[in-house]
Image (tube, helix red, strand yellow):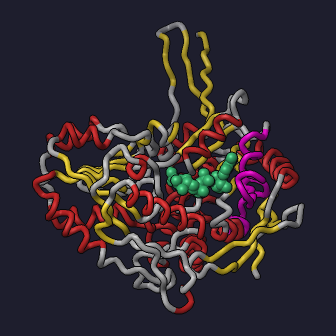
Amino acid sequence: MEKIQNYIGGELKAPISGNYLDNVEPATGKVYSRIPESGEADLELAVEAAEAAASYWANTSLENRSAILSKVADLIDSNADELARAEAVDNGKPVNFAKAVDIYRASANIRFFAHAITQFSSESHGMGDIAVNYTLRDPIGVVGCISPWNFPLYLFTWKIAPALAAGNTVIAKPSEITPMTAYLFSKLCIEAGLPDGVLNVLHGTGASIGAPITTHPAIKAISFTGGSSTGAAITKATAGQFKKLSLELGGKNPTLVFADCDFEETVNEVARAAFANQGQICLCGSRIYIERDIYDKFRDALVERVEQIRIGDPLDGATQHGALVSKGHMEKVLSYIELARDEGGTIATGGQRRTLEGRCAEGYFVEPTLIEGLDNQCRTNQEEIFGPVATLQPFDSDGEAVNLANGTRYGLAASVWSRDIKRCHNVARQIDAGIVWVNCWLLRDLRTPFGGVKSSGVGREGGLEALRFFTEPKNVCIKY
Ligand code: TXE
């Protein structure tokens, strides 16, 4: 059985403790590999390697940093099929989705920042004939990047690409639930000639290695994506250490469907927004609000569309809806469907665990589920479920739609579906979110700020926001 290894100081290494955790394939429920249970001793090795490489990498020319990162992206592209299959096995998502979204975007993340860093300029401020100021934006040094299981390589590279491009050395921890592609990526970095210690990847749980990374005094900034409760724990743990924190957390995103929307396209896109990646995207539209005039017609059309989604083996190219990431997460999602029933909801479609034939008979499959008849303040509509579950509610006015949309502690994303451009501008302006899509969903320009407000996080990733997070500005003022 394959034993995943840490990547420290340019070498693949076993955990010092010799302890490993089981890694389960969600589609079969069977252990298929083992992952290091790293601890503080492994972290010390990684910090030593990252510190030793820090000044060399910081002083590597932009062109050379860019060239090495571009080589890594090339290797992702030339190994895309192997990486996509590994992602589908590890996460349970359909292999075609993994190829088209996860691996495509992992390569794009690295290529984007390999180029962006060569265009990253700074500022100067003249003071007439008295003095001139110029702003330096230097790498911070050793930084920590901690990523989740829903887009394993995509979100892993989304953090380490700007960190490395900006000249930092990185200690990265992928989720213990989906470690495989980060391990394969480590091998590609060795093949690309990334200098030893520039990137170090430690595998293990949040408690054994995630938390120690966040509080280690040599690690000067933390970029984290995961649950809001974990984000709060990291904020508490690092209080008083004055570290830079970027927290991309949970979401409970509203979808606002107005009667004048492009009906057919909106039905298809609202279904995709609710159930892509088995609903395991922080950006998924899990609260669907429909203008009352078209509520019944839209609900019926959406149910019909959702019931066409093909649930199946993640390794089957025809599959559109795979397994949830773990037994524990499947049970959490099923418990929320039970809660919705208890809170008075009616299941419009789905609602059950799906048992497949053959090799996936023990897999963690849950039907795409639509629930109606719930109040906006109930737990089902207030708490992030992070699975294939979405609720439907009618509204009667633009103002009511905005109030319903803003009625949770989250504020990550939203989508608005209407032909009335004046209304779309006004509704987008009033929604408490970091991202509002109008007549589209998950249309991404990597230059744009990415992140949320309220309990959805602090700070922004993407484009110059990411490069500014991973650098320290210094103002130098010179008198004439
Ligand atoms: O996140 P976790 P998970 C939400 C969603 C999901 C919930 C849990 O609600 O159900 O988060 O998902 C590491 N210090 N999102 O389990 O537990 C952990 O090992 C440092 C939304 O993935 O927060 C993993 O590598 N690190 C999110 C990473 O943090 C710690 C996408 C995320 O783990 C730690 C994924 C600690 N104390 C989940 N505890 C989004 N917004 O995209 C855990 N970790």
Relative to 351, 401 lies left or right:
left
Percent of width and height locating residue 393: 25, 53
Res 447 seen here: no
Would you say residue 420 sits in the magenta stretch?
A: no
* Closer to us: 303 or 47: 303
The quarter of the rendered structure image containing the N terminus is bottom right
Percent of width and height locating residue 173: 69, 55
| Residue at 69% across, 30% down | 239
* Closer to us: 455 or 342: 342
The quarter of the rendered structure image containing the C terminus is top right
| Residue at 46% across, 56% down | 385
Q: Is residue 154 above or below residue 376?
A: below
* Closer to us: 18 or 100: 18
Percent of width and height locating residue 386: 47, 58
Percent of width and height locating residue 68: 64, 59
Would you say residue 199 sits in the magenta stretch?
A: yes
* Closer to us: 71 or 378: 378
- Tell me which segment is drawn in magenta: 188-216
Relative to 174, 321 lies left or right:
left
| Residue at 17% across, 67% down | 264
